[in-house]
Image: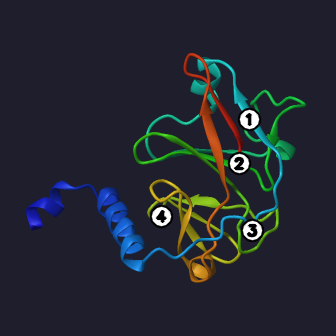
Amino acid sequence: MPALLKSLSHKNIIAAALVAAIVLHGCDTLDDDRIPVHPVNISFSTVSDWDIYGVSGALTWRNFIREKREPSNYPYTEMTYTGFGGVLLVADVLGNPQAYDLACPVERHKETRLFINTEAEYLAECPVCGSRFNVFSLTGHPVSGEAAAKGYALRRYRVETGHVGTYIIVRN
């Protein structure tokens, strides 16, 4: 067994432990509807746009906040919408794109935005309440803090593939 654990990366062990914890915890329902519904439309109309502004490779992320023009060089248009608190776009542990609202479901303020804590196993963390969410392998499930205690998950957005390797992020 120790040889097997040594062969697994630290991140894989953490991901497996978190999945096991969720499975052992049971099938409790999570509330992912606490963030007010707002329009979401972020388009990557060319492969080049995705290569510049998207996420490539596992455990990468980018924030999209229209009113802050973040990222600063993204070509925002009249039809670009970034949800309630902004959009957190990540590439999960398999490299697949996933999207979440940046607003903390506990705090429910558009200015209280999550950040990726690279010192805490790459979990999305609220700077106010300290709740942490797994956005790279557990689709925005809470793993600690008030959000975990109350069962508040992140609001997810749909990432759809377009033609020839393009993507669009829209509200579910």
Q: Secondary structure at mark 2?
A: strand
| Residue hosting label 3 | 34
| Residue hosting label 4 | 119
| Residue 67 percent coordinates (x, y) | 87, 45
Upstream in the sequence, badge 1 or badge 3? Answer: 3
Residue 109 lies in what quarter of the image? bottom right
Question: Is there a contact, CB below 8 Å, between mark 2 and mark 1?
Answer: yes
Rendering colour mode: rainbow
Question: Is there a contact, CB below 8 Å, between mark 3 and mark 4?
Answer: no
Question: Is there a contact, CB below 8 Å, between mark 4 and mark 2?
Answer: no
Upstream in the sequence, badge 3 or badge 4? Answer: 3
Upstream in the sequence, badge 2 or badge 3? Answer: 3
Q: Secondary structure at mark 3?
A: loop
Q: Residues within 10 Å of mark 4 (few under 14, many from 20)?
A: few
**As drawn, 42 above or below 112:** above
Q: Secondary structure at mark 1?
A: strand
* Callout 4 amino acid: Glu
| Residue hosting label 1 | 42
Of badges 3 and 4, nearer the viewer stands 3
| Residue 44 percent coordinates (x, y) | 68, 26
* Callout 1 amino acid: Ile
Residue 105 lies in what quarter of the image? bottom right
| Left or right, residue 103 beside residue 62 | right
